[in-house]
Amino acid sequence: MEEQLTNAQGQLQEKHDQLVNSKAQVKKMEEQLTNAQGQLQEKHDQLVNSKAQVKKMEEQLTNAQGQLQEKHDQLVNSKALVKQMEEQLTNAQGQLQEKHDQLVNSKAQVKQMEEQLTNAQGQLQEKHDQLVNSKALVKQMEEQLTKAQGQLQEKHDQLVNSKAQVKQMEEQLTNAQGQLQEKHDQLSPDWVISRDQIQVTDKCLGRGGWGNVVKGKYCGCAVAVKQIHDLILSNHNRSLFEREMNIASRCRHPCLLQFIGATNDEGSPLFVTELMETSLRALLKRPLSASELFVISLDVARALNYLHQKQPFPIIHRDISSANVLLWRQGDQWRAKVSDYGTANFMRHTMTVAPGAPIYSAPEAVTKNQTVKVDVYSFGVLLCEMSIQEMPDPEKRKQQVALVSNRVIRALIRGCLQTEPEERPCMEEIIDELEQPT
């Protein structure tokens, strides 16, 4: 702005000088004009003859007056420009004053910030001193922590050893409790029946590799009596039999065949249960209705679920088959009960041939790695048999499963027949599936 103002002032001075010169010229011309008029009056007569010269001078005068008017207009414009520049100068001075005030304020702020910086530097020094002290404290705490970690590791090792000792003691306690229960059962088993209390008839209800089942009487009631083939009743076998009978006597479930008792003398054992009307194998001579299929399979599943969840240890049946599912009438509906849950394990230990029918057996049944999932596999085979009324054939397993028309049952069977035991469902999941409305 200052530079523009200086330029404007220079131009104004130049115009002023031109105007002064113009005025001098005008004054000079006025003098010349006066002289010319005098000469004109004096030489009026000469001027008459010199009209051409006068006319020429008039034209010159007209031109001079035009130039004079132009200079006058320039002067007016110069005054307006000077006024505008004065206003700009006034504004520039106001802005300069405002910048000056801002500079004064900035200096005050700088002074204030210098004071704050001084204070901050003091606080920083104080924090630095605190940090130095903190590092010393942290180092001391790290040493204490290292020491504490060492003590903690020592305590952890002691705890691990203690847990191992506790686990060992728990195992010893469990074994002791088992032995105590076994001794208690040996002293006073309530399942023992005197042989002379059992009346055996000639009516055979069924035959198996382990012996026959005949109709009999016990305490005035009709019962089923399982006559086990002659066994070498060594002390070990007798101990096994007594253990299985103790287990069977503690099993109580509506879908399990009621165990009444067994003999425990020197002869081959007699195993007494409630008497049922027929077996599932006999019923499968005709097709089952959808209702019969679901009701009977649910009863079997509930019985196995009870055995598998038995405490303290699960009971594995190991011999699920249509022959070991017995039936009774409830109104117009057949209901099922699982039998042989008390002797399957005993028979496996005491006989050369495993009691479980191979056509129902899971792949791992011939190994020692058996879990409750062997019963799940057998249940799947049984469910397939119930659906198609064909005896199971391991060589045609996939073809037989494909013949099952009910897609829910077919999918359930395939789940039960998985080769890997852990991939099979548990009986509780099977019950949930069978209870779903179709």
Image (tube, rainbow, N blue to C red):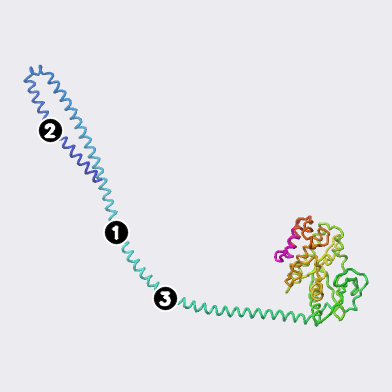
- Marker disc for residue 108: 1
Residue at mark 2: 24
The residue under label 3 is which amino acid type? Answer: Ala
Name the secondary structure under disc 1: helix
* Coordinates of residue 388 in the picture (x, y in percent): 82, 58
Compared to residue 161, the image places residue 60 above or below, namely above
Looking at the image, which is closer to me, 216 or 270? Answer: 270
Compared to residue 138, the image places residue 10 above or below, namely above
Magenta residues, as a range? 411-428
SS majority, magenta: helix
Residue at mark 3: 136
* Coordinates of residue 400 in the picture (x, y in percent): 79, 58
Q: Quadrant of residue 420?
A: bottom right
The answer to whether residue 412 is magenta is yes
Q: Is 116 left, or right, of 182 in this rendering?
A: left
Looking at the image, which is closer to me, 77 or 283? Answer: 283
Please tell me whether mark 1 or mark 2 is closer to you in this view. Answer: 2
Q: Quadrant of residue 107?
A: bottom left
Name the secondary structure under disc 3: helix
The residue under label 1 is which amino acid type? Answer: Ala
Q: Is 345 left, or right, of 174 in this rendering?
A: right
Q: Name the image quarter holding the N terminus.
A: top left
The answer to whether residue 425 is magenta is yes
- Callout 1: few (<14), some (14-19), or many (20+) C-alpha neighbours within 10 Å? few
Mark 3 or mark 1, which is nearer the start of the sequence? 1
Please tell me whether mark 3 or mark 2 is closer to you in this view. Answer: 3
Q: What is the distance, in whole Å, between disc 1 and disc 3 at their CAs?
A: 42 Å
